[in-house]
Image (tube, grey):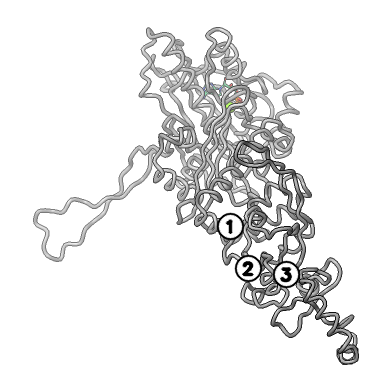
Amino acid sequence: MKQFKTESKKLLDLMINSIYTNKEIFLRELISNASDSLDKLSFEGINNPDLHVDQDSLEIRVSFDKDARTVTVSDNGIGMDKDALEKDLGTIAHSGSEEFKRENKEHQGEDVDIIGQFGVGFYSSFMVADHVRVVSRALGADAAYAWESDGVTGYTIEPAAEGERDGADDHGTDVVLHLRPSTDDENTDRFLSEWGLRDLITRYSNYVRHPIRMMVEKSREKPKPEDAGDDYKPEYETYEELETINSMTPIWKKRQADVEQKDYDEFYKSTFHDWEDPLRTVSFHAEGALSYDALLFIPSQAPFDLYSKDYKKGLALYSSNVLIQEKCEDLLPDYYNFVRGIVDSPDVHLNISRETLQQNAQLRAIARRVEKKITSELQAMRDNDREDYEKFFDNFGRGLKFGIYNSYGSKADELADLLLYWSAKQGKMVTFAEYVESMAEGQDKVYYASGESRERLEQLPAVRSAVDHGYDVLLCTQDVDEFMFQVMRSYHVDAKAGDSEHKGTEAKDYDLVNVTTAGLDLATDDEKKDAEKAQDEHKELFSELKDAMDGKVDDVKAAAGLGDAPAAIASEGPVSLEMERVISHGPE
Ligand code: ADP
Ligand code: MG
């Protein structure tokens, strides 16, 4: 028996116990290797027609034997000869696939889309298996060889047994895992079942481009006997059938113009378990130094748990059609946490772990582009399809507001332009920009009022008075609104260059002011004079009223410009009454 080198032993241990947090990915790794071997064969076949490679016959087979506790992954790909078994499987962290890619790139100037590159994936088998036997026959080789190991002490390589790939055309590889017993931590028994394997294949390897087939048990009605009487009841029998388990067509690789919306809708609903079609679908692609395909969906409706602690944002991350992470958080900013979708990049490494993902520059570059795409999709919807946008905003607007509340400037301007508020004057939802555009002559502030409901706010004396004086007021009814306004402080409008028809404008900041805050000077001079007069005339009454309130108010005075409202409660300082209520009772 050959011994693993000590470094290898250590590495193996490290690998098995720390690179992968999730044991079930072993199947993904073996299927990816099988897929690579089919790609290599296919590649050789195209470059060398004398080999007569039948491209249609390439396939991956997965099977299990419950009694023997084995799971087998087979391919009819390029196979490994004795040397390759030694070099590629016997040397941990040596990747034959990476070598193949390098060689073929140099020689043919052609990039082969092969998944493997680190030379450790195969060893993930030992997370679930205590013994692995690999039988392989290289394309054109005289014989098959078997590599065996317990993953701890070392490995053996011997000629394969009789009946194991002994036909001249039997090139390819069988990887047979003998599974460890189930423990409290890991249920390995589930891998010894059709549903268990099917689950892993559809989850991790659904978009591998070669068929992954499995013998499955099915049931059918027996033919009705000719002499069956009236009381005949149909009988059923089980039979076995080879089924292709993976769907193979990665819809995100296609150009949006080539896909029908209903296919995207189906894909979205089945992949993300929603029963409504998405509100928007965005697909984009990058090529060059960093290549990737991305497919994003803006849902029509917020999932029930969106605002709960348990909600996890993220996009599914694939590398060459193979799932790496179901929810890669780093690909989405918090305020776009509602977006569902997929990013697939051959440049992102398969066995990347959680920690390194965060530091991954490529991933950050993709995340930036994803964010930009979502922003521009929302802007377009806001400008061109207000009905849909209001629906969107109704579902997800609260998250955008929290985004402004948390993002101190950097993205706040961009996000602010995505907000909608009810305009007391115009009687509809408006953006800040629309508010500013329809502002009264000389107005240089954005007025808002916050409270429980639109109806109540519309009745607020301060709001009615402002509207009567020609000032619009944005009515805010969400708990986060006022906190967000505190952080925003002002609405910023960029400078606009002029042209032959329009005058240019300078950049400007419009302070956000709560209309109920005392000292707001909306009243006309006449009204002010009236108020002053009233203040003088009723001084005693006001002071008695104040005493009667017994410390509940700071002062009682005549206010200018309340319109037909008899009285109003106002607050001084930055915190409005509404916000005080939220602070003392907590947001609803
Ligand atoms: P990687 O796939 O990152 O290269 P692995 O540890 O998964 O690393 O595999 C190591 C090497 O073993 C591969 O690069 C490949 O050369 C070889 N190999 C593994 N499985 C197969 C297979 N089914 N057919 C042919 N070669 C294989
Ligand atoms: Mg691999």
Residue type (three-letter) at the residue carrying disc 3: Pro
Residue located 73% across and 20% down the image: 5
**249, above or below 312, in the image:** above
**First along the sequence among labels 2 and 3:** 2
Where is ligand 2, by quadrant? Answer: top right
Helix, strand or loop at mark 1: helix
Label disc, if present, on residue 393 of the rendered structure: 1
Q: Nearer the viewer, residue 507 or 491?
A: 507
Helix, strand or loop at mark 2: loop
Which residue corresponds to mark 2?
A: 424
Helix, strand or loop at mark 3: loop
**346, above or below 271, in the image:** above
User: CB of mark 1 within 8 Å of CB of mark 3?
Assistant: no
Which residue corresponds to mark 3?
A: 587
**235, above or below 36, in the image:** below
**First along the sequence among labels 1 and 3:** 1
Q: Nearer the viewer, residue 424 or 15?
A: 424
Measuring from the top left, give residue 484's x and y in whole percent.
74, 59
Task: Classify mark 1: residues with Cα within 10 Å, few (<14), some (14-19) or many (20+).
Answer: many
Q: Residue 101's quadrant in the figure?
A: top right
Residue located 67% across and 34% down the image: 363
In three-dimensional space, the C-alpha distance between marks 1 and 2, rounded to whole angstroms, equals 18 Å
Measuring from the top left, give residue 176's x and y in whole percent.
52, 31
